[in-house]
Image (cartoon, rainbow, N blue to C red):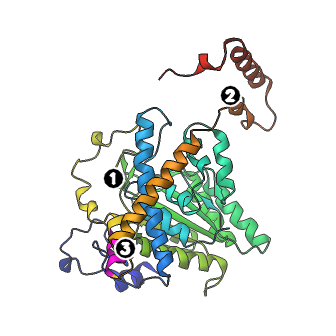
């Protein structure tokens, strides 16, 4: 699906759209009220409701996680509000054993894969929380921008060598396209026909740096041209558009289309309604009114509108989904807060063989805990 084909098929004339469209030329299936603008993916009603349910759960998790951080119950957290569609729908478009390599904001991918309680435990500071991600084929989150992308391509190349019918999907933000790892990963994928899907979440900002200050390229999708494969620009706040584009990219990566085992770069155009993280103050660099034009494209009301228009959802279903999201998130929080921290864990996976100096620090800390008791090292509430 080329940019030109996508635009011709589903993007309406701006003069016919009473709602301001801040995205430009993008592939789109749903209008701002959930009305159908393009071809709806061939999904069952249950699958469509599942996508909606996971998006609502991601939004509820986001609300609770921000609150937990403000209470000092978890560490710095990257909010997802406004970007739920791209990570949830992209994951639904993959097979369950296709590994997801994500940055740190794509919580919807974890939720779509089952939402283990260990995930929240990681944000509470328990490194063991990453074990739950391994069980659902999600690579541990990365704070180093784009550092996970070569790993994703390496996994994809391994699948190809082994004739393993799997695809590696890498999520990253627009800021990652300014990193060397981004270019190295895409170059390898293009040269070696690695079965990869690259999902670039273009929310307009890399913390406080606007997209236009990062690159002179008119779009991020077009960067794929330099590496010999296709780039697609999609409405990242439209779950059905994201699903369709990622589904096609995954099939192309598997060699199920005319293009044998070819990667795809997908630019999901979206907006983060909140701060970059809970340590950020977007009012210092973003106009307070800048997000107003994006609110009409909020992915959750759009998906709900579509489901209602198609007779799939009514008030009872919407209410039950919201209640289920509340219960699901509450259960994860309760279970995560039962984790008992082991201070030795912070030294466990730093090196394959612990250096003498680090071993000395570990022994000193454990000896101090033994002398003074664990409570002496806990922050007072």
Real-space Cα separation, disc 2 to disc 3, in angstroms: 48 Å
**Is disc 1 surrounded by few (<14), some (14 to 19) or many (20+) residues within 10 Å?**
some
- Indicate the secondary structure of the residue bearing disc 1: loop
Please say if the residues under marks 2 and 3 sit with CB atoms less than 8 Å apart.
no
Q: Is residue 195 left or right of residue 29?
A: right
Mark nearer the N terminus (1 vs 3): 3
> Where does label 1 land, which residue?
273
Q: Position of residue 365 (x, y in %)?
A: 70, 19
> Which label was assigned to residue 26?
3
N-terminal label among 2 and 3: 3
Q: Position of residue 19 (x, y in %)?
A: 21, 70
Q: Say few, some or many: other residues with alpha carbon within 10 Å of mark 2 (under 14 / 14 to 19 / 20 or more).
A: some
Q: Nearer the viewer, residue 129 or 26?
A: 129
Residue corresponding to mark 2 = 343
- 3D distance between C-alphas at marks 2 and 1: 36 Å
Q: Which residues are magenta?
A: 302-309
x 26%, y 68%: residue: 21
Name above or below for residue 244 compared with residue 361. below
* Distance between the alpha carbons at the discs numbered 1 and 3: 20 Å
Between marks 1 and 3 in the image, the one whose residue lies nearer the viewer: 1
Q: Percent position (x, y) of residue 42?
A: 49, 85
Is 205 one of the magenta-colored residues?
no
Q: Is residue 263 left or right of residue 164?
A: left
Looking at this view, is 190 or 375 the one in front? 375
Of the two numbered discs 2 and 1 in the rendering, the one whose residue sits closer to the viewer:
2
Secondary structure at badge 3 equals: loop
């Amino acid at each position: 699906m080329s940019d030109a084909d996508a635009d011709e098929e589903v993007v309406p004339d701006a003069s016919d759209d009473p709602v301001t469209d801040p995205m430009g030329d993008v592939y789109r299936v749903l209008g701002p009220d959930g009305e159908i603008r393009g071809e709806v993916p061939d999904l069952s009603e249950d699958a469509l409701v599942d996508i909606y349910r996971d998006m609502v759960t991601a939004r509820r998790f986001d609300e609770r996680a921000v609150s937990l951080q403000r209470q000092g119950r978890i560490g710095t957290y990257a909010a997802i509000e406004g970007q739920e569609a791209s990570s949830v729908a992209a994951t639904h478009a993959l097979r369950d054993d296709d590994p997801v390599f994500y940055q740190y904001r794509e919580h919807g991918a974890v939720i779509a894969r089952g939402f283990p309680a260990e995930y929240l435990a990681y944000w509470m500071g328990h490194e063991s929380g990453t074990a739950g991600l391994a069980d659902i084929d999600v690579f541990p989150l990365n704070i180093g921008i784009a550092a996970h992308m070569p790993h994703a391509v390496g996994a994809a190349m391994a699948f190809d060598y082994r004739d393993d019918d799997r695809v590696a999907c890498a999520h990253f933000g627009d800021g990652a396209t300014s990193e060397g790892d981004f270019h190295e990963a895409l170059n390898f994928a293009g040269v070696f026909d690695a079965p990869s899907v690259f999902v670039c979440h273009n929310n307009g900002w890399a913390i406080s740096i606007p997209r236009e200050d990062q690159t002179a390229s008119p779009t991020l999708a077009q960067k794929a041209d330099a590496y010999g494969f296709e780039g697609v620009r999609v409405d990242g706040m439209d779950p059905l558009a994201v699903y369709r584009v990622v589904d096609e990219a995954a099939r192309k990566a598997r060699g199920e289309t005319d293009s044998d085992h070819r990667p795809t770069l997908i630019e999901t155009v979206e907006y983060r309604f909140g701060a970059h993280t809970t340590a950020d103050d977007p009012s210092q660099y973003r106009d307070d009114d800048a997000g107003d034009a994006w609110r009409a494209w909020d992915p959750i009301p759009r998906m709900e509108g579509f489901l209602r228009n198609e007779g799939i959802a009514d008030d009872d279903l919407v209410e039950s989904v919201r209640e289920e999201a509340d219960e699901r998130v509450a259960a994860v929080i309760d279970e995560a807060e039962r984790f008992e921290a082991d201070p030795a864990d912070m030294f466990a996976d730093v090196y394959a063989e612990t250096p003498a100096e680090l071993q000395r620090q570990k022994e000193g800390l454990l000896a101090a805990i033994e002398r003074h008791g664990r409570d002496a090292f806990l922050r007072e509430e």
